[in-house]
Image (spheres, rainbow, N blue to C red):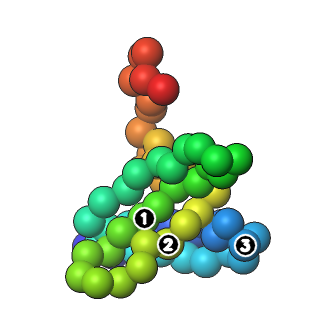
Amino acid sequence: MTTWKKVTLVSGQAVHLDIARASAVKRVLGQGKEFTSVYFGGNSEPFEILETPEDLLGISPRAGAI
């Protein structure tokens, strides 16, 4: 099943990702940067986006989560 989501790259460009094919999503914090990396398996580079994993996946953050 295809699940397209419009996101914003850290460069400011809007793109659409098929999040149903993503293999991992993680939030990157530190060194003055804050973004989400979305991985699609294989040896491809992750997409670095501004949206949080919770926004991307449509879930609520857990209480006490950082």
Quadrant of residue 64 within the rendered picture: top left
Residue 11 - label: 3
Residue 50 found in image quarter: bottom right
Disc 3 to disc 2: CB gap under 8 Å: no
Residue 42 vs residue 8, the one in the foreground:
42
| Residue at horizontal 58 percent and vertical 63 percent from the top | 49
- Real-space CA distance between mark 3 and mark 1, rounded to the nearest whole angstrom: 15 Å
Q: Earlier in the sequence, mark 1 or mark 2?
A: 1
Q: Which mark is residue 47?
A: 2
Q: Of residues 66 and 14, which is closer to you in this image?
A: 66
Q: Is residue 3 visible?
A: no
What residue type is disc 2 on?
Phe
Q: Amino acid at mark 3?
A: Ser
Label 3 Cα crowd, 10 Å radius (few <14 / some 14-19 / many 20+): few
Assign a secondary structure to mark 3: loop
The residue to which callout 1 is attached is 38
The secondary structure type at the circle numbered 2 is: strand
Q: Nearer the viewer, residue 11 or 63?
A: 11
Query: Disc 3 or 2, which lies upstream in sequence?
Result: 3
